[in-house]
Amino acid sequence: MSIVVVGGMDRLERHYRREAEKLGHQLQVFNSASARMSARIQGSDALVLFTNKISHKARNEAVATARKSGIPVYMYHSCGLCTLRDCLQCLGCGEHSPG
């Protein structure tokens, strides 16, 4: 499963990637707005958005792109590793509903 994370902390990016690899997911992380962010979101299976560590402009762009492409959006205020881990585990088992 290909997942895009928008937001989060730079120092946790390698930990985010490690957790995704453990669960068999491919992870793209964007800690800030990027020119290629929309293209990466369009080709993914899910979008995880950490709302406390991203600009409103980047958040709106990511959500609009995902919704236009029919990609589920999971929003969390917290950007900790445990939050991502819980989300990834639920995505793998299909129990999580997008927010």
Image: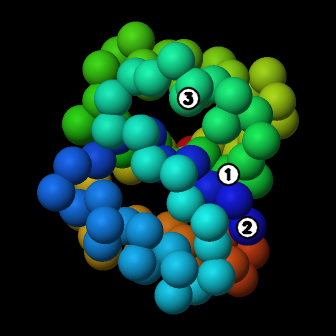
In the picture, the disc for residue 1 is 2
Where residue 8 appears, x then y in whole percent?
28, 47
Q: Quadrant of the N terminus?
A: bottom right
Relative image position of residue 10 (x, y in whole percent): 21, 49
Is residue 86 visible from the viewing direction of this image? no
Q: Dot 3 corresponds to which residue?
A: 37
Q: Are marks 3 and 2 in contact (CB under 8 Å)?
A: no
The residue to which callout 1 is attached is: 46
Q: State whether residue 60 is above or below residue 27.
A: above
| Badge 1 or badge 2: first in the primary sequence | 2
User: Which residue type carries mark 1?
Assistant: Ala
- Residue 73 sits above or below residue 92 on the image: above
Q: Residue 44: x percent and y percent? A: 73, 48
Snapshot colouring:
rainbow
Distance (Cα) linking label 3 and label 2: 17 Å
Q: Name the front one of labels 1 and 2.
A: 2
